[in-house]
Image (spheres, rainbow, N blue to C red):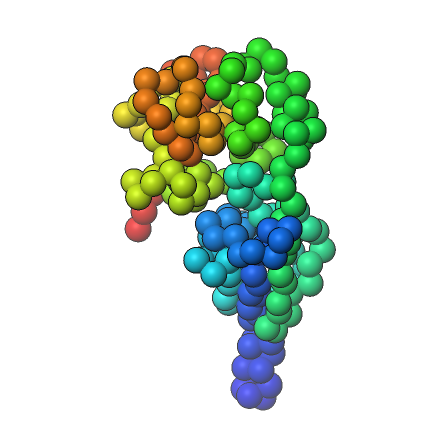
Amino acid sequence: MCLFLLQALLAQVSTIKGRVTDPSEAIVPGAVVTLRKAGSRDLRQTTNEEGVYEFKNVQAGAYTIRIQKPGFALYAAEGIAISGASSFDVRLSLATDAQTLKVEDEQNAVTTDAQQNAGALVLREAELKSLSDDPDQLAQELQALAGPGAGPNGGQIFIDGFTGGRLPPKSSIREIRINQNPYSAEFDRIGFGRIEILTKPGTDKFRGDAFFNF
């Protein structure tokens, strides 16, 4: 009886592993992979230098997989069945000019020249939901999205145009732009992977977010 229960429990614990490549089948390191199951907490990994991600000890079931990387179109696949040792390789598509123009047209009020280059990744409500609510974890995910081109110290973070402040609660963030244009007249220095956070109006008061580490 105990052996049967142990086998049943082990059968519920699964692993999924895969490699992320570009259209030419070159590996894509630094891509953020999100594993989502209804009623469960999102799981995230970043592809290593070989473009590989791996989630261990996950419950068997149907999942949604999302993959984000600057310069590539957002990848999302629903209903991916995970059971036992599963494999799921993904080939990303390059972001197109049409996709970039669509993002700019959605909110012309916040569009500036620095934001119109094709290398800018814009995260709004739908994309922000997939990121962590913990400011420290959120900062790590944004640096991963900025990619290795941002340099050894990562991308510089601007909050409403200013640097040096703490990340605001995710609930107060209106939009995040990861700008790959190093030559922007809006900023006083050259920079790759610049992370620009725009907050919602009237977010200078406490909104009820709290995080505890035990």
Whether residue 54 is visible: yes
Residue 4 sits above or below residue 211 on the image: below
Residue 165 sits above or below residue 88 on the image: above
Residue 74 sits above or below residue 18 on the image: above
* Residue visible at 66% across and 18% down in the picture: 105
* Residue visible at 62% across and 67% down in the picture: 87
Closer-to-camera residue (173/7): 173
Closer-to-camera residue (198/50): 50
Q: Position of residue 159 (x, y in %)?
A: 38, 22
Q: In which quadrant will I find the N terminus?
A: bottom right
- Tag count in the figure? 0
- The picture quadrant where one finds residue 111 is top right
- In this picture, residue 62 sits left or right of residue 177: right
- In this picture, residue 38 sits left or right of residue 149: right
Q: Position of residue 104 (x, y in %)?
A: 62, 21
Whether residue 207 is visible: no
Q: Where is residue 71 in the image (x, y as percent from the top left)?
A: 55, 38
Residue 89 sits above or below residue 181 on the image: below
Q: Where is residue 64 in the image (x, y as percent from the top left)?
A: 65, 52
Closer-to-camera residue (116/86): 116
* Residue visible at 52% across and 39% down in the picture: 70
As drawn, the residue found furthest toward the right would be: 79
- The picture quadrant where one finds residue 16 is bottom right
* Residue visible at 62% across and 61% down in the picture: 89
